[in-house]
């Protein structure tokens, strides 16, 4: 129930983004940091079905950015960050948990 409320709140506030997949060539931190800056996102939680090492590495040094696999997604982490970015795979799996 709490997970449903947290996801609904992010959607209602316009702070939930759905992407086909997370793809960062070579694990470049600058790519992730620039993308967040262009969208004026100060903090974000990225949730994917299975997080690839390149993407995890790219996000590791970006302040106020967390990356979790879908199975690790929880209400605390969702509410702690300003923006929630879900891959379509994670969205399908999260919907199954509701």
Image (tube, helix red, strand yellow):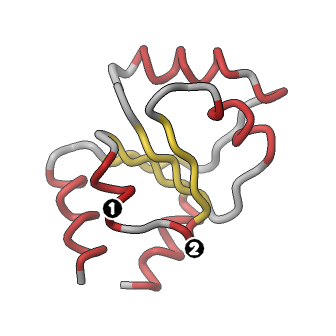
Residue 42 vertical placement versus 83 (above, below):
above
Indicate the quadrant where residue 42 lies: top left
In this picture, is 27 found above or below 33? Answer: below
In the picture, measured across the screen, residue 77 lies left or right of residue 28, that is: left
Give the camera-side residue of 81 and 15.
81
Q: Which image quarter holds the C terminus?
A: bottom left
Name of the residue lying farthest toward the right: 26
Residue 59 position in % (x across, y down): 62, 33
Quadrant of the frame with the N terminus: bottom left
Where residue 67 appears, x then y in whole percent?
57, 48
Q: Nearer the viewer, residue 21 or 27?
A: 27
Label 2 CA crowd tier, 10 Å (few <14, some 14–19, many 20+): some
- The answer to whether 45 is drawn above or below residue 48 in the figure is above
Quadrant of the rendered image containing residue 4: bottom left
> Could you tell me which residue is drawn at 51 percent across and 73 percent down?
92
Q: Is residue 12 left or right of residue 67?
A: left
Residue at x 79%, y 38% (from the top left corner): 54
Which residue is denoted by mark 1 in the rendering?
A: 76
Q: Residues within 10 Å of mark 1 (few under 14, many from 20)?
A: few
* Of marks 1 and 2, the one in the foreground: 1
Q: Which mark is residue 71?
A: 2
- Gap in angstroms between the C-alphas marked 1 and 2: 14 Å
Residue found 15% across the figure and 46% down from its top? 13
Residue 74, how many percent across, how many down? Answer: 41, 68
Q: Left or right of 88: which side holds 37?
A: left
Q: Is residue 25 left or right of residue 48?
A: right
Q: Secondary structure at mark 2?
A: helix
Give above or below for 35 relative to 27: above
């Amino acid at each position: 129930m709490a997970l449903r409320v947290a996801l609904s709140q992010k959607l209602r506030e316009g702070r939930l983004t759905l992407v086909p997949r997370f793809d960062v060539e070579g694990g470049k931190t600058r790519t992730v940091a620039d993308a967040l800056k262009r969208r004026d996102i100060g903090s974000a939680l990225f949730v994917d079905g299975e997080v690839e090492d390149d993407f995890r590495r790219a996000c590791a040094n970006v302040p106020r950015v967390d990356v979790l696999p879908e199975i690790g997604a929880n209400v605390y982490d969702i509410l702690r960050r300003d923006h929630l970015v879900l891959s379509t795979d994670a969205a399908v799996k999260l919907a199954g948990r509701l």
